[in-house]
Amino acid sequence: MEVDLGQDRAHSARMYDFYLGGKTNYAVDREVAQEVIKAFPAVETVARANRAYMHRAVRYLAQRGVRQFIDVGTGIPTAPNLHNVVQAVDPECRVVYVDNDPIVLVYADSLLYGTPEGRTGYAQADATRPDELLAAVKAEDIIDFDRPVGLSLHALLHFVPDEQNPYDLVARLLDQLPAGSYLSLSHCTGDFAPEAWQTIVETYSQRGTPLQVRSRGEVLRFFNNLDLVEPGVVLAHDWRPEPGSGPSLVSNAQVSLYAGVARKP
C-alpha cells in the first residue's frame, strides 16, 4: 500500500528540520517556515534551544541511573539523537522512539543503530491515543515496565490543543510507568512575544497543523503529582546550563520555550 507522505503540504517535522538547518524538507515546508520566521525571526533559536535542552535533560537522567527511555514525537532524526546521548553515559541504555508521521518512519532507520550493548526501536503510534501508544511500545519488547523509564515529550504538546485533552494523555502515559520514572517536557509559549506567537499559531493552523502555545502555569500543570527536579519549570536555556557556558546570549523572548524534568514518586 502506498503511504501518503504529504509532500504537497507543509509538515511540522520537516519545518522543524529546516529550523535546525537540516535538509530533509521540501519547498512547501520552507515556504511556510519562512512565513513563521518573518513573524518571529528567533524561531530557529527556539528549535536549537529545544534540542540543546533535550541533550542536557536525558544526559542528566542517564547520569542518575535511568537506563530506559521512551521518546514520543521523535521527529526527523538529527544527530546526536537521544540514544546517542544516553548510550554515551551507559552503552546499555535502551530507547524506543515513537511518532505517528509517515515521513518520520521513512528516516527511522538512523535511529536504530546504537551500541551493541543497548537496544533501540521505533514504534508508529499517535500520542493522542496513549493506551495504543504504550501497547505499540510494549510490542517492541525493549522497555521493562517494572523498571524506571524516562518519558520524553519534547516540543510535542503544543501540537495537542485542549480539545484533545493533553493533560489527560500525559497522566495516562505516566500511570503505566513505575515509581522512579521521569517526565522530561518542553513546550512553546507566547508569554514573552504574544503577538508574534499568535501569528505563528494562525500560520500553522491555516496550513493544517493545530498549534496551541501555553503559559508557564499551563505547562506546570503537566507536572501535577510529580516531584520537579531543580530548577523546576523554566525557560529551556535556563534549565541546568552546561558548566562554564557563561551568560546566555539569547533573550527569554527569543527562546519562548518552557522546559522541566520531574520524578514520579
Image: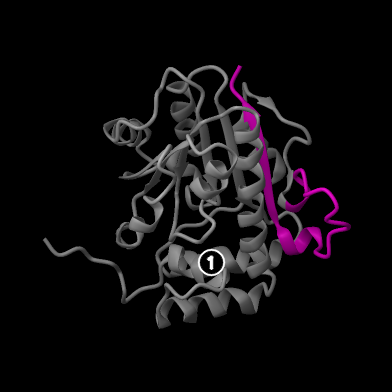
Magenta span contains residue 261 = yes
Q: Residue furthest front?
A: 116
**Residue 249 appears at what percent x and percent y?**
83, 65
Horizontally, is 175 left or right of 5 in the view? right
Q: Where is residue 18 in the image (x, y as percent from the top left)?
A: 52, 73
Q: In the rendered image, which quarter is residue 133 located in?
A: top left
Label 1 CA crowd tier, 10 Å (few <14, some 14–19, many 20+): some
Residue bearing the label numbered 1: 202
194 vs 33, nearest the viewer: 33
How is the protein colored in the picture?
one colour
State the image quarter where residue 97 is shown. top left
Question: Could you tell me which secondary element the residue under label 1 belongs to?
Answer: helix
Find residue 61 and report its horizontal and vertical position in percent: 62, 34
At horizontal 78% and vertical 49% (from top left) the residue drawn is 242
**Which residue occupies the foreground of this view, 241 or 228?**
241
- In this view of the protein, can residue 86 be seen by the observer? yes
Image quarter of the C terminus: top right
> Which residue is more in the foreground, 68 or 133?
68
Q: Residue at the spot x=40%, y=65% of the render? A: 208
Image quarter in which the N terminus is found: bottom left
Q: Which residue is drawn at 45% across and 64% down?
A: 12
Q: Which amino acid does label 1 sit on?
A: Glu
> Is 68 left, or right, of 248 in this rendering?
left
Residue 214 seen: no
For the record, the magenta segment spans 237-265
Residue 110 located within the stretch drawn in magenta: no
What residue lies at 43% left-to-right and 47% top-to-bottom? Answer: 114
- Which of the two residues, 179 or 56, is positioned nearer the viewer here? 56
Count of marks overlaid on the render:
1
* Left or right: 157, with 110 as reference point: right
**Residue 135 percent across, percent down from the top left:** 30, 31
